[in-house]
Image (spheres, rainbow, N blue to C red):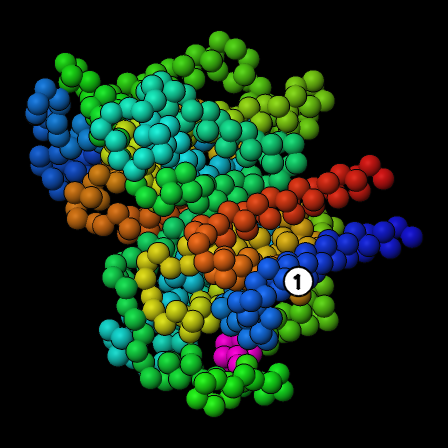
Amino acid sequence: MKKREKIDGKVFLLIITILLFLVMYAAGLIIFKSKGFAKPQVFLNLFISNAGLIVIAAGMTMVMITGGIDISVGSIVALTCMMLAWMMEIKGMGAVPALIIVLIMGIVFGLVQGFLIAYLKIQPFIVTLAGMFFARGLTAIISQEMISIKNELFLKWAKSKINLTFLGGTVNKKGVVNYSFIYPSVIIALIVLIGIFVLLKFTKFGRTIYAVGGNEQSALMMGLNVRRTKLLVYVINGFLCSLGGFLFALNTCAGFVEQAKGFEMEAIASAVIGGTLLTGGVGNVFGSLFGVLIKGTIETFITFQGTLSSWWTKITIAALLAFFIILQSLFAKAKEKK
Amino acid sequence: MNKGKAFIKRLTGYRLFLPLFCLVLVLFSNLIKTPGFFEVTIKNGVLYGYIIDVINRASDLVILAVGMTLVVAASGGTDISVGAVMSVAGAVCCFILSGGQQSVNEFVNPYILGVLAAILAGILCGCFNGFLVAKLRIQPMVATLILFTAGRGIAQLITKGQITYIRVESYKMLGSSIPGIPIPTPVFVALIVVLLTYVLLKKTTLGLYIQTVGINAKASKLMGIKSAMIIFLSYAFCGLCAGISGLVASSRIYSADANNIGLNLELDAILAVALGGNSLAGGKFSLLGSVIGAYTIQALSTTLYAMGVSPDQIPVYKAVVVVVIVALQSTELKRMVSKLQMNVKSGKKVA
């Protein structure tokens, strides 16, 4: 009986999130009807422009389930984009080796942060705060100027449309049919999402992550290797950060110092809005997907509205994050009283 | 021989040894690199030189470090919104003084009104953080992350995305100098904040309470101390400090630049606290240590500037310093090292 109540609480937060997304989207359909909000492409654009964030939010969800946090993700995305741009444009490397180097960089970053957090038991905030400034500074050391990516193979990856003919298309003035489309980045993001879902739900390692986050002491007494689990989670997260950064670069096709500022906040907000508890032990990557979609919808609103400053996105996300945090803590308090 | 060893041990055991040692180290490295570092000249009736620059520029950081020390001590967490709160305070002050115009040559509203509003804005931001941390018991880093990101957005909205200029001589005084006094004004502001806080902590039981709550919030609650209230107050105070610091920073450039006021200062403030020998896990703290830490950081920054390192790149070095200091504080590392030493010793015995 008790177990049932617990599950209900978790599902409840997720339901609120999904409902919020549906209500927001429906509101958009009504308000911006004349501007073409109802096109399937508008919905698909949510995935296209947020492919990187989906991947990073999945990694963040994992980290947060262990009870940790990673605020270095935005800077690592900037570093990834800058490294890709620098290696391909200044050093003349191919797109494939550049991608491999960047992914290794992410893993190394995760390894160092994970070691400091899991083995030296330093607070995750402090470690990743230092990581955040370190990565951003490193980006500035590589180049202070913006570097645009013009590598052919890279642009081919970025711009090859995958037409979804079953969604139908619109015929423009010249008589050419424009189908709704997605980019390859969306497919990568969705594969990662499903991969992490399976990892968390159906593997021993995934269950260990939940156990560590739920109660570290108990997990330790059960004979689970807490340290190694945490280290691995940060390593996977580092890898996902650089992969997410790569997807981000596919969208922007450039590297510059100020890139992806505040990205950590968007990733954390997506996870929290999606029902991941800040205290650890509870979380679901599909919830985080809805968190990302909500953020994307807010952005679309601001673009469609046309006159609002883009700062409003950040402020709205921050307000939503605050709202969901308060909701979580109310749930926790209600549970304590029982 | 033994006496010398004991002396060194006592010296290194002294709480402020590490921060002072670092400060001296940084300053002396300058003596070799930039021989003119300690030269002080007088220009337009104001002291001028690298060393004066360090003391002057460090003032913003000293004020922030005071607030941050209390937050760290009471809650074992850090307030990463201080830089953004500084920009909010600057924006509020300039908004009131300019009456919403983009550039003015005289105050539209009284100066004191702008100052009070800015400080109030700082306190409000601090109260918001404090409410989330103390009442809702949210991890400090996440709670302050909200304002860390949204703060600059709010400041942008207040200034309407532009830089608001206040071209009035008396507005510049807080950040530069008052005619007739050769020492830059920010130094005095920092001194006043430090002294008032010191007296407040020593003359009342507040300092003791903050330490008690930081060491064990539950136990102190059982003892009858309102832990939540103490933590809330420490965040509100940190907001106040950020507000004052924002005023000084805005006065330096006689404008409200929402993007750049207090940029990257949150890391510096945390670093100052850590360098001052305070544990980032909360509990016992030394205000003086943090203040010395703040001067050390500024000396380091100025040194790096003098060597031609760009402001964007400096965080790399600081981040490394933070990690090293925190790793040295870690008890796990000590355990690992002592284990290693034991292994080496027992290995020798077997051989």
Left or right: where B112 falls relative to A69? left
* Residue B2 can be seen, yes or no: no
Residue A41 vertical position relative to residue A65 in the rendered view, above or below: below
Judge whether residue B160 is colored magenta: no
Residue B213 vertical position relative to residue A97 in the rendered view, above or below: above
Q: Residue furthest bottom?
A: A175
Which residue does the numbered mark 1 point to in the structure image? Answer: A26
Q: Residue at x 48, y 50 (%)?
A: A312
* Mark 1 residue crowding within 10 angstroms, few (<14) / some (14–19) / many (20+): few
Bounds of the magenta segment: A181-189
- Measured as percent of width and height from the top left, residue A6 is found at 81, 52
**Front-most of residues B328 and B86:** B86
**What's the amino acid at mark 1?**
Ala
- Measured as percent of width and height from the top left, residue A272 is found at 63, 53
* Residue A286 can be seen, yes or no: yes
Q: Residue at x 41, y 35 (%)?
A: B88
- Measured as percent of width and height from the top left, residue A337 is found at 82, 36
Left or right: where B91 falls relative to B215? left
Instruction: Kindly indicate the quadrant of the structure image that contains residue B94.
Output: top left
Judge whether residue A184 is colored magenta: yes
Instruction: Report the predominant secondary structure element of the magenta stretch.
Output: helix
Q: Chain of mark 1?
A: A
Q: Residue at x 58, y 27 (%)?
A: B232
Q: Residue furthest right?
A: A1
Residue A317 vertical position relative to residue B167 in the rendered view, above or below: below
